[in-house]
Amino acid sequence: MEQKIPAHIAIIMDGNGRWAKKRGLPRTAGHKKGAETIRKIAIACNQKGVQALSVYAFSTENWKRPEEEVDYLCKLPRFFFNRYMEELKQNNIRVRFLGEIERFPIDTQNVILSAVEQTSENTGLILCLAVNYGGRREITLAARAYAQDVLNQKADLAIEEEAFGKYMMTADMPDVDLMIRTSGELRLSNFMLWQNAYSEFLFTDVAWPDFDVVQLNKAIDEYTARDRRFGGLK
Ligand code: IPE
Ligand code: IPE
Ligand code: MG
């Protein structure tokens, strides 16, 4: 069967820590391997014609982890972009982010902003990193910005869904079509609550560091076979 290509794939990249533990490695080794998986999957999605790939890299809840692990996760964007920026550029990939990066160390913020800027003219896949991101926080910030616009008489009180969606961090991106969570957990963990309203969910036991193009194809095959009705009848 010919694959239907989702316009927007979102991935909760889970299981880095367990992957490392199983191999007797520190949890950080799992995060490093997980960053390499992002590169592989982004390039594959770009080749397949996916418009946007959003990956959950750090949640608003992940600050609760031990300081050492949080520090490591804060440094990962620099490792990732130092290593893969050229390749991302060559592949015409556009980097974006979701979340409030102000809470990260300044050099991490700069690395992310520079990646966005260096790839802003690209026209291929949007690789969207969710960093210090939480779905409820995003909706709360959107509500605040909208309320401010109402006060400033820039927005109408009787706003519709589509217009309110423009206040989200994903503003001009399509809704999520396929949401994948790796490593066996069956929950959303506060990821893209607005954008996942009608996405197809796919859960796999494979840990994120082991996720590969074969797994991606399996996920897209399953998505292709799903019957999406959006509340209507077929
Ligand atoms: C996902 O892997 C990456 C982040 C949350 C940053 P985990 O670190 O949650 O790995 P597990 O779930 O403990 O195995
Ligand atoms: C979700 O994974 C966040 C990211 C993948 C960045 P977690 O491992 O933090 O989620 P919980 O704690 O299992 O809900
Ligand atoms: Mg986890």
Image (tube, rainbow, N blue to C red):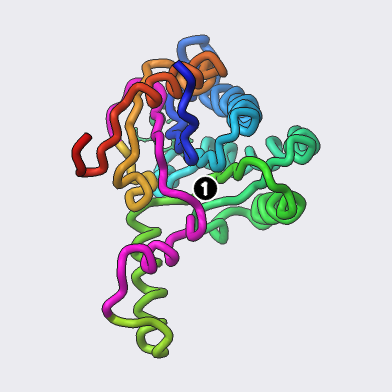
The answer to whether residue 220 is visible is: yes
User: Picture coordinates of residue 133 (x, y %)?
Assistant: 45, 51
Ligand 1 rendered quadrant? top left
Q: Is residue 119 left or right of residue 60?
A: right
- Residue at the far top in the pictured view: 23
Position in image of residue 23 (x %, y %): 52, 10
Residue position marked by numbered label 1 in the rendering: 131
At x 49% / y 55%, what residue is drawn? 99
Q: Residue at x 55, y 18 (%)?
A: 212
Q: Is residue 109 above or below residue 186?
A: below
Q: Amino acid at mark 1?
A: Val
Depicted 230 relative to depicted 205: above or below? below
Image quarter in which the N terminus is found:
top left
Residue situated in front as seen by the camera: 177 or 152: 177
The residue most toward the front is 234
Q: Residue at x 43, y 34 (%)?
A: 12
Q: Position of residue 225 (x, y in %)?
A: 35, 22
Q: Main secondary structure of the magenta part?
A: loop
Q: Is residue 70 left or right of residue 190?
A: right
Residue 49 lies in quadrant: top right
The answer to whether residue 14 is magenta is: no
Between 108 and 7, which is closer to the camera in this rendering? 7
Label 1: few (<14), some (14–19) or many (≥20) C-alpha neighbours in 10 Å: many
Q: Can you tell which quarter of the image residue 190 is in?
A: top left
Please tell me whether residue 3 is drawn above or below residue 83 in the rendered image. above
Point 63% across, 33% down: residue: 46
Q: Nearer the viewer, residue 168 or 173?
A: 173
Q: To which quarter of the image does residue 48 belong? A: top right
Helix, strand, or loop for circle 1? strand
> Where's residue 194, x and y in %?
34, 52
Q: Quadrant of the C terminus?
A: top left
- Tell me where the magenta segment starts and ends, as one range: 158-187
